[in-house]
Amino acid sequence: LKELISVARDNDLLAAKIHELKLQLFAATNLKTCVAAVEESMRSGFGADHSVLVLFSDPEMFKDIEAGRFFLAIKRSDESLAPFGTFLNGKGPRCGQVRDTQKNFLFRGDAEEVGSVALVPLGKKSEIGFLAIGSHDADRFHPGMSIDFLARVGDLVAGALKRY
């Protein structure tokens, strides 16, 4: 019973964080503030050790977005995305260990610090991109965990980004 209550409390906290993200996304007035809201939510709200928002588009279109290591615009046809092929054509979030090529692509100089990763598609089959959340803890994201909340975050972020 104590374990069920603990899980319920954790789920309630996650639901509150998702609601806060939703409010921040509603308040965003352009792509720049939308990306900033997602970054702030990942870092402060969800306590992500590392996160990267990958959008599929021509990088030249996003020169005004200064989100440092958090934001990456890339053409979906770019060869550096080849290691993500199975995920990009999948149906939902993936959690667990990722290949070194994937970690290096996403987290660059911080790749060695990342023990586990959640990959969250933005749109069906990651049509507009994906969100990568990295944890120092190798067991934080694992294949057996529930992905419902991650899918909701992906849906919210995708819906907000489609406005721009």
Image (cartoon, rainbow, N blue to C red):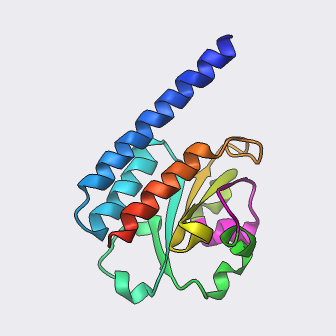
User: Residue 146, position in %: x, y?
Assistant: 68, 41
The magenta stretch spans residue 98: yes
User: Residue 158, position in %: x, y?
Assistant: 45, 63
Task: Tell me if residue 135 can be seen.
Answer: yes
User: Which residue lies most toward the top here?
Assistant: 1
Q: From which residue to which does the magenta span run?
A: 90-106
User: Residue 135, position in %: x, y?
Assistant: 61, 48
**Is the residue 137 above or below the residue 1 in the image?**
below
> Which quarter of the figure is the N terminus placed in?
top right
Q: Residue at x 53, y 71 (%)?
A: 129
User: Residue 5, position in %: x, y?
Assistant: 60, 16
Residue nearer the viewer, 44 or 56: 56
The magenta stretch spans residue 131: no
35 left or right, relative to 131: left
Q: Residue at x 66, y 87 (%)?
A: 79
**Is the residue 115 above or below the residue 121 in the image?**
above
- Residue 105: quarter of image: bottom right
Q: Residue at x 55, y 30 (%)?
A: 11
- Residue 103: quarter of image: bottom right
> Which quarter of the figure is the C terminus placed in?
bottom left
